[in-house]
Amino acid sequence: MFIGEYNHSIDIKGRLAIPAKFRAKIKKGAVVTRGLDNCLFLYTQEEWEKLANKLASLPISQANTRAFSRLMLAGAMDVKLDSHGRIVIPQYLRTFSSITKKVIIAGLFNRLEIWDEQKWNTYKLATEKNSSEIAEKIGELGV
C-alpha cells in the first residue's frame, strides 16, 4: 500500500528518486501516465494491468470513455528503477504536469501521484479549505 507525502527533486535528465519505502513494490517495473488534476500517476505493473483491462473493456462507442482511455493509455510509459532508486519521467509527461524541479510524491493506496510542488500546495490548500463539503459528499457514497 502506498501512503504518505514526500518531497523530492527531479534532475535535468528527468530522473526522480522514488521514496525508499516504495522501491521494493516497483522493483519489477511500473507504469507512469497522465493523471487527473495535472499530476502523474505511477502504478505497479500489477495495478496497471488491472486498470488497463478495465479501460479496454469500456465501450468505445462513448466519447468520454474513448477520451479517458486515450488520456491514460496513450500517455503511459513503462519505467524501471535504476541502481539509485530513480525512474525517468519522459519530457512529455513533465510538460503535461508542469514538473520542473521540486516534486511531491503522494501515496494513494494503489498508486503514487507525482505533482509539481507548487501545484500540489495549491491543490492541497483548496482541498483542506473545502474538507467539510468533500466529507459530506463522500459520506453520500457510504464512506
Image (spheres, helix red, strand yellow):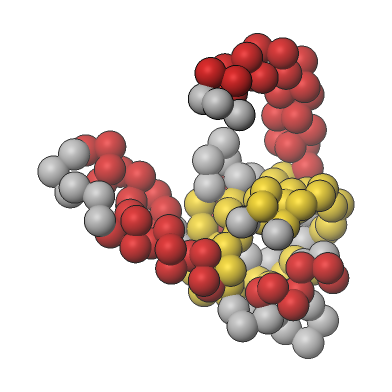
Quadrant location of the N terminus in the rendered image:
bottom right
**Is 5 situated above or below 130?**
below
Residue 46 pos. (x, y %)? 52, 71
**Is 33 situated above or below 85?**
above
Residue 57 pos. (x, y %)? 25, 56
- The residue sitting at 84% across, 57% down in the picture is 8
Q: Residue furthest left?
A: 61
- The residue sitting at 78% across, 42% down in the picture is 117
Left or right side of 54 for 1: right
Between 15 and 113, the one lying in front of the other is 113
Among the 4 quarters of the image, the one containing residue 39: top right
- The residue sitting at 42% across, 53% down in the picture is 72
Left or right side of 51 for 25: right
* Number of marks drawn: 0
**Residue 4 visible in the displayed image:** yes
**Is 140 situated above or below 15?**
above
- The residue sitting at 82% across, 58% down in the picture is 9
